[in-house]
Image: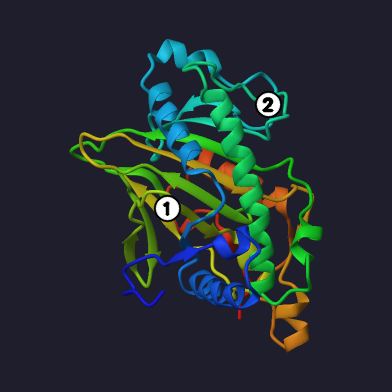
Amino acid sequence: MEKASNYIPTVDLSVFITNGEEEGKRMAKERISRACSEYGFFQAVNHGIPLDLMSRAMELCKSFFGLPDEEKLKYRPKSGAPVPAGYGKQPVQSADKNEYVMMLPPQNSFNNLPNNPPGFRAAMEDMFKYFSKTGEVMESIVNDCLGLPPNFLKEYNQDRSCDLMSAKRYFPATDTENIGISRHEDGNIITFVLQDEVGGLEVLRDGQWIPVLPSPGTIVVNIGDTIQVMSNNKFKSATHRVTRQEGKHRHSFSFFYSLHGDKWVEPLPHFTTQIEEPPTYKGFVYKDYLALRIRNKTHPPSRPQDEINITQYAIST
């Protein structure tokens, strides 16, 4: 944690996974609190996801996206799916340059996961389950780091039906364009990313883009807008993007530990009235915010300053 500011901190989660000594947990929570308040991001090691599963899933991901388009298109989203669960590719006019397989919770009937290459479907389902477990652990840690009552976030956010995972392949950079995903913040609770050796994920801090360098066995953890609002800006949802390299595809898995759409989100009394601080956001229904973000994605504004993000609900001071 004492590294220079142009590095994303790395935190060892083993003390939580193995239910280790309280002093070890306290020290790890201090590091996580600092990372979440200063960066909104950190890399996690010893997170509980089997390393052989991570490696196998990544290799199968690369194999799937290397298949001919006609094979990948067999796994397009089913009619009526609430989100595009299955294979898709960003439109040509989109600023985002990637193709993906999106997944709802494994039991959801709208999933259309690839059977080719053999083992990819099972690997995605296993990755989803382990990411979900890690999300529960991380949510509990964030709860404690924020000083909330025990199990407050767990009881608030018990419904896991809205969690999402995606496997992505980013196309190589061109002579004129190197953005894989344009700058944005995540709207959910917590996001986890497993990236390959190519890298390209960058976090904006103090006006500088900081690369999140790939490291074997690590996952990237970042705070979403929902936690930023509920903590009244104590923890930050950082702006980030993905850049592309010439001649190289980039592969990743992203897991979005989310919130049911009907949930009401607002700065908690623990960070406002109980400490005599004014709220910095108006309350909102989570699905209303998601609808604004989706509209912003499907109908991009002509001016960057018109893009929708959590400042939509900011209270002017």
Instruction: Tell me the CA gap for discs 2 and 1.
Output: 31 Å
In front: 27, or 226?
27
Depicted 133 relative to depicted 81: above or below: below
- x, y percent for residue 195: 40, 44
Identity of the residue furthest to the left in this view:
175
In front: 48, or 314?
48
- x, y percent for residue 250: 34, 38
Depicted 188 relative to depicted 315: above or below: above
Report which residue position mark 2 lands on: 81
Depicted 22 relative to depicted 58: above or below: below
Position of 67 with respect to 296 (left or right) is: left
Mark identifier at residue 303: 1
Position of 41 with respect to 281 (left or right) is: left
Can residue 313 be seen at all in this image of the molecule? no
User: Residue type at mark 1?
Assistant: Arg
> Residue 3 sits in which quadrant?
bottom left
- x, y percent for residue 163: 66, 43
